[in-house]
Amino acid sequence: MTELFSVLFWGAFILILHSYVLYPASLACLSIFRKRYRCPAGDGESTRSISILISAFNEERTIEERVRGFLSIDYPSFEIIVGVDGTSDRTTEFLNRIEDPRLKVVPFEKNRGKVWVLNDLQKLATGTILMFTDANTRLQAGALRKIEHHFANEKVGGVCGRQEILPPEDPGGLKLESEYWAFEGWLKKLEGDQGMTLGGNGAVYAVRRELFVPFATHARIADDFVLPLKIIEQGYYFVYEPEALAIEQSGDLRGEFRRKVRIGAAVMATLGTIKSLLNPLRGFAAYSLWSHKIIRWGVPFLLFVLFVSNLFLVSQSTLFYFTLVMQIVCYAVAAIGVVGLLRGIHIPLASHLGYFAVANGALLIGYVSSIVKRPETKWEVSRN
């Protein structure tokens, strides 16, 4: 039994280390020696029409300001199609105040969920490029041109922009969320160097209209993860453009916790739509998918295995005694960090460990909820 627990301990340790350290390091080294994709040279002329698709639900606080901001973008040919998903507030009313031929407002009586709305909106789109963004997002000037430029390369099927999380306005805001997205952006850039950025972000990503694959609607899925992988599955590049900037406001720990629970609940349904890319024969795509996503999603279970196996090994050597003590200390410090974050206090190291623990705990709850009940495709907005 000792040998079994030793294998479990070191296996879990290596997998966690690989996802957070070894995989990013391997990407950085690979980008130095080989880049499969480079952005087309020159600025070029923006000639492709773009349809900006937005699914909105109870967004009366920000929707009018955001859409007017989109309409002020300097780009020669674009339209905005907003699907109002069975709203219970005045979202539709505020949108109808805007008189602009480039804006189409499509109200739906029943709240069905984001993927249902996007499936319907893409049928109404006239642009050669479909861009997806969120109702609470601000796009920086030049974002559309930066994204469109990549489509000059016929191998490019989709482009993901950079999401920047602003520092929180309230004391309970979560500064660590912006650090997390900065790290994710760095990984997306390195993956994009190989033509295979794994997933976009809901704030800003775009695909060729003819490559759009309707989203599965039997359960909640992550649209900004599934569609980019469907593009890659068809043999096209999905790349990253850091200068196409989308800005959102940081939330608080509770909001981030709810978001991670939703992600956890959607994992199994999401994986079921991209099974072919899990095959190691798919090369870099499979390596990145397993390293960046699958193993990362499995960290809650790996942490459990790491702790329990360590309990059985603690009497075997001083090393295992030390690793058990370190795990207990880390969880204790994380608990302090969580209390601090809930009170709007940032404690160096403790806050980072607390954020890590909360994120993985939320994923685990999401997994359990997806097993005990059928995940809903409907969603609700949680804004600060």
Image (tube, rainbow, N blue to C red):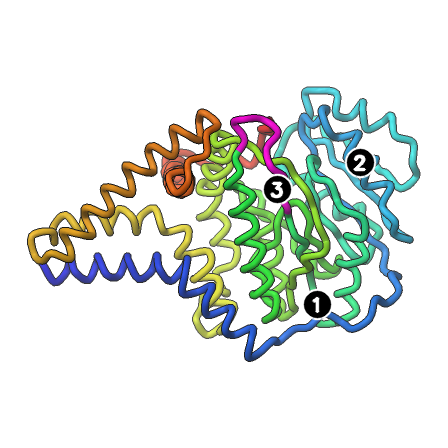
User: In the rendered image, which residue does mark 3 sit on?
Assistant: 165
Circle 1: residue type: Val
Vertical relation: 200 (above or below) 220: below
Q: Looking at the image, is mark 1 or mark 3 nearer the viewer?
A: 3
**Which residue is pictured at 41% across the width and 40% down the height?**
348
Rounded to the nearest whole Å, what is the CA distance between mark 1 and mark 3?
27 Å
Pinpoint residue 383: horizontal percent, then vertical percent: 60, 28
Q: Residue furthest bottom?
A: 33
Secondary structure at badge 2 equals helix
Residue 185 located left or right of residue 265:
right
- Magenta stretch: includes residue 168: yes
Which label was assigned to residue 156?
Answer: 1
Q: Residue furthest top?
A: 89
In this rendered view, identify the residue nearer to me: 90 or 31. Answer: 31
Secondary structure at badge 1 equals strand
**Which residue is pictured at 56% across the width and 48% down the height?**
181
Q: Residue furthest front?
A: 348
In this rendered view, identify the residue nearer to me: 217 or 3. Answer: 3
In this rendered view, identify the residue nearer to me: 151 or 42. Answer: 42
Circle 3: residue type: Ile
Q: Earlier in the sequence, mark 2 or mark 1?
A: 2
User: In the rendered image, which residue does mark 2 sit on?
Assistant: 67
Circle 2: residue type: Val
Q: Looking at the image, is mark 2 or mark 1 nearer the viewer?
A: 2
The magenta-colored residue range is 164-173
